[in-house]
Image: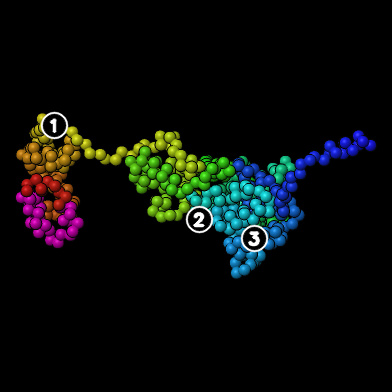
Amino acid sequence: MHEQQEILYELWPEEQVEKKSHSRLYSLEPVRMGSPMVESLTSYIVRLAEAHSVYPRALILHEIVPLLKLLSLHQNGHFVYDCGEVSWKDSCILNGRTTQTGDMVQALEQLTSRHDLHFLTMLPWQFVLSSRKLLRRTRAWCPLCYQEWRNKNQTLYEPLLWSLEVINVCHRHRLRLQTRCPNSKCNQVQLPLSQHAQSGYCSRCNSWLGSLPQGEAGESLAFEDNEWAWQLWIVHSVGDLLSAAPALTDAPQRERILFTIDIYAEKLTRGQRVTLFHQLECNSSIENWFYKTQTLQLSHLLHFCFRLGASPLQLLLGNIEEAAVEKHTPVDMPTKRYWKFDEERIQQMLEAILKSEGSSPSMEEVARQLGYKYRQIYKRFPELCRAISAKYMASPIFTKTVQVTLGVTRSITIQQQCRRFDSERVLQALESPSQSDIKKLKRQKECREFS
Ligand SMILES: [Zn+2]
Ligand SMILES: [Zn+2]
């Protein structure tokens, strides 16, 4: 008896047992967190509802509505997902980067006692990526992924990747994502979150989504190599963003990215960012990133990075990639060159032109070939310059040029006027000179040499 009492005493420790808090709903683990194939928030809501043997509508109305009084999820005093079909049609934003997304994440984290559900959305990129054309408004899926997961008895879910508008293919199966129910009698599109949604099944007719419509396989697999390379690059680049999100210490900021682009412009186009955009043949809307406070459209960012040869993730983190810099030939902007005027060489050249048989080039052309301005040469060798110009204007080439330029047959008269450099009289020689005629004529710099 005495021994038994001692044993019982040992079973009860002196300190108080710590009271553990429990979540109201299952603390369901998101699928593939921190990987390119991380689950979307709408998929998580569907699976959370399935885990409690209810439909998403019941989960939202009976658990989230009483909990939340957040304005973004209410309109006219009613919870938006209880207002009929219209609100469910906008359910794609729950995977995005808006206030509604944040409110839904907050509600679910409170119910499940989790602190990582915002990584199932685009919220980590809210300060840099625009909502414009970010999310597709209907479900998209890879049937072969669904079938494979079911064969391997793995969790059926929807990756966040599939909810983004820029993603059109499954990189694992080289297949276009499907957007219509494979059941020929249904063949309808699906909302990202619907009242009776189930993972892997059509929310309208409950058909299995893991099969291809008849005759679809061959057509879907037909990718041109160029197109496939581009699609694959998009998937990997966006996948990098999604997998990196949980490891970020700070949310990437727009200003930092613009600063990084300016560094690229400094290295490649001597700081001329507009030249950089033109060189990369980017959409002109990219230039607006700098002049307005708008965030970046994901598709534009991808085009810019693809042509630059940089990773979107590294750009958003503000990192310069040397490989991207080396890929391009820096634009050589004209710089002022100062060198000694080689009088002896120039004189020899001018004399040689004058002595040569046949027609002579214009002094403008001669100066360009010698690498000097015409005025520099004329200042030192006025006689030689006049002689070369006279030779040029006496040549058939000049006559023809004037004829073409002015578009009249009275070129000889004009040529004579030019010799006296009386431009007013030259213009009078024309019956009705237009403004462009006058400009073209004035461009004949040879006339000026006689002033
Ligand atoms: Zn697939
Ligand atoms: Zn269906």
- Identify the residue position indicated by label 1 in the image: 342
Mark 3 / mark 2, whichever is N-terminal: 3
- Identify the residue position indicated by label 3 in the image: 68
Secondary structure beneath label 1: loop
* Residue 50 magenta: no
Secondary structure beneath label 2: loop
Q: Of residues 221 and 48, which is closer to you in this image?
A: 48
Residue 143: % across, % down: 66, 47
Residue type for callout 3: Leu
Give me the disc on residue 441.
none
The answer, for residue 41, to whether it is visible in the render is yes
Q: Of residues 393 and 147, which is closer to you in this image?
A: 147
Residue 215: % across, % down: 64, 49
Q: Residue at x 60, y 41 (%)?
A: 35
Drawn side of residue 30 relative to residue 424, left or right: right
Q: Which residues are magenta?
A: 412-441
* Magenta stretch, overall SS: helix
Q: Residues within 10 Å of mark 3 (few under 14, many from 20)?
A: some
Q: Residue at x 40, y 51 (%)?
A: 290
Q: Is mark 1 within 8 Å of ligand 1?
A: no
Mark 1 / mark 2, whichever is N-terminal: 2
Q: Residue at x 41, y 36 (%)?
A: 325
Dividing the image into 4 quarters, which one contains the N terminus?
A: top right
* Residue 440 magenta: yes
Residue type for callout 1: Asp
Disc 1 from disc 2: Cα separation:
61 Å
Drawn side of residue 360 relative to residue 192, left or right: left
Q: Of residues 447 and 324, which is closer to you in this image?
A: 324
Tell me the mark number nearer the camera, choosing from 3 and 1.
3
> Which residue of the protein is positioned furthest toward the right in this rendering?
1
